[in-house]
Image (cartoon, rainbow, N blue to C red):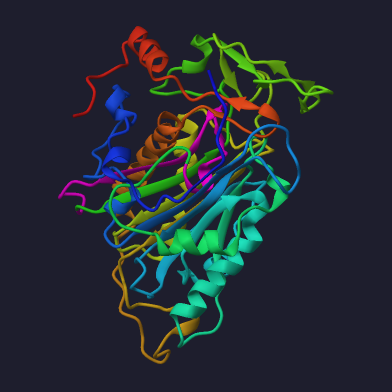
């Protein structure tokens, strides 16, 4: 069923037509609130570019430093590669069992001066240093930054302690960033991730506000590695509870047998879905959520937007468990010349800033909740079953079973066209 995973290194920059044709949650008939942008992706916010470097190498027993490798890097550039101007931003940690570098300065100044990168837990340092190098080579008028790099733990599928991500991998993700459709599932930093017990990874979605609400766009990208199958709700339904699941399984037993969280592995039954956790256990994972908008928001308002990411997770059954790092960052591409942080060209000149009133934010808060919810489901729908280190296997969300459960509850809608 799973086959041998051939040694492979993949570089994905943006979604090709074949990637764009992969089914997404709406294509399956999963219902969502709100109106998406034309791409239903974070890149619906004009100027935003996304790049990936995906690393998938080897199979079999875990040999520290050699593999198997199931990891990568995701890069989000708020204004693209050719526009170095800063953006206003706000940061929020729903539960802090995770890491995102560079956020002290975002909190202090309200300004984001660098791209945002996401990778696996063991690779934050090398990716952060690579981002510094990339900025240094592109901006000769400046000499220091605080790169923003977030992480989630790609375990048990990846040799997380093997330090397989290189400077070049991070530079490739940054250099490969593009506008347009965004690949999802097992790509970039999301390659080895688990989402609500199923294979997870990268997901994206967007919302376009009505003309009466300002016509603004909110776009979200997630690296999803949090939650349990037992608690997962899609369209309000506990979908996994109506599927046949098996926890902590492998396609081949080693000697001595593999174990995780104190439980000995069992051979996977191909008739059952291999989820990452036992139904009664908290999954010790995390999620990074990046929120972009073109609405004119100041840093305090963007922190409010970031906080609403947690509400989106709540709609899916998430509760920000103790072992989870639920980390959110939001930025606005409006006010392009308001503040360049450490590299402000004319610090004596007062900034002219556009700012929505607090009451006008309600549609943006709602759009954020809706986009986060859909981005997480898109990550699961796009992901594919993966066997990784020590033959641990995590099943993808089965499209047919998801549709069957939703149909049984009267929640399946005609697929999007």
Q: Is residue 196 magenta?
A: yes
Residue under the image location 40 percent in, 89 percent down = 345
Does 224 appear above or below 413?
Answer: below
Identify the image quadrant of residue 411. top left
Give the image location of residue 343, x and y in percent: 46, 84
Disc tally is 0
Q: Residue furthest left?
A: 211
Nearer-the-camera pick, 233 or 20:
20
Left or right: 167 in relation to 280 = left
Residue 399, percent from left and from top: 39, 20
**Image coordinates for residue 405, horizontal then vertical, percent:** 40, 11
Q: Is residue 163 magenta?
A: no
Horizontal side of 249 relative to 55 (left or right) equals right
Quarter of the C terminus within the rendering: top left
Asked where in the image residue 100 lies, by quadrant, the reply is bottom right
Apparent side of residue 145 relative to residue 45 in the rendered image (left or right): right
Magenta-drawn segment: 187-214
| Image x and y of residue 17, in percent | 26, 42
Q: Residue at x 36, y 7 (%)?
A: 408
**Can residue 28 be seen here?**
yes
Residue 238 makes an appearance in the image:
no
- Front residue (pair 95, 288): 288
Q: Quadrant of residue 78?
A: bottom left
Give the residue furthest to the right.
256
Q: What residue do we see at 48% from left, 38% from top?
A: 186
């Amino acid at each position: 069923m799973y086959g041998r995973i051939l040694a492979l290194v993949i570089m994905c920059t943006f979604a090709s037509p074949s990637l764009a044709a992969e089914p997404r949650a709406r294509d399956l008939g999963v219902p969502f609130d709100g109106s998406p942008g034309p791409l239903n992706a974070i890149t619906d916010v004009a100027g935003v570019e996304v790049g990936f470097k995906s690393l998938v190498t080897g199979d079999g027993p875990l040999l520290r430093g050699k593999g198997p490798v199931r990891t990568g890097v995701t890069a989000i550039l708020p204004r693209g590669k050719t526009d170095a101007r800063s953006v206003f931003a706000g940061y929020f940690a729903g539960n802090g069992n995770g890491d995102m570098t560079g956020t002290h300065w975002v909190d202090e100044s309200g300004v984001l001066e660098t791209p945002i990168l996401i990778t696996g837990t063991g690779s934050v340092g090398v990716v952060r240093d690579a981002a510094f190098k990339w900025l240094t080579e592109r901006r000769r008028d400046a000499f220091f930054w605080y790169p923003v790099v977030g992480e989630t733990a790609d375990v048990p599928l990846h040799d997380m302690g093997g330090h397989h991500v290189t400077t070049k991998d991070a530079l490739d993700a940054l250099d490969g960033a593009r506008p347009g459709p965004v690949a999802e599932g097992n790509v970039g930093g999301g390659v080895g991730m688990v989402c609500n017990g199923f294979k997870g990874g990268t997901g994206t979605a967007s919302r376009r506000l009505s003309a009466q609400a300002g016509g603004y766009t909110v776009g979200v990208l997630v690296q999803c590695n949090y939650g349990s199958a037992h608690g997962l709700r899609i369209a309000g339904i506990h979908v996994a509870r109506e599927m046949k699941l098996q926890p902590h399984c492998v396609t081949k037993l080693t000697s001595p047998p593999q174990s995780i969280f104190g439980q000995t592995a069992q051979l996977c039954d191909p008739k059952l879905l291999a989820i990452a956790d036992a139904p009664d256990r908290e999954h010790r994972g995390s999620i990074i959520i990046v929120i972009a908008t073109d609405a004119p928001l100041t840093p305090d308002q963007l922190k409010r937007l970031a906080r609403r990411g947690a509400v989106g997770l709540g709609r899916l059954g998430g509760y920000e468990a103790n072992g989870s790092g639920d980390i959110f960052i939001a930025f606005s591409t409006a006010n392009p010349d308001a503040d360049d942080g450490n590299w402000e060209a004319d610090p004596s000149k007062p900034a002219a800033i556009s700012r929505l009133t607090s009451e006008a934010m309600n549609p943006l808060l709602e759009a954020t909740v809706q986009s986060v919810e859909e981005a997480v489901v898109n990550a699961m729908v796009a992901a594919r079953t993966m066997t990784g280190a020590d033959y641990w296997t995590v099943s993808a969300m089965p499209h047919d079973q998801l549709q069957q459960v939703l149909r049984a509850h009267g929640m399946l809608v005609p697929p999007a066209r």
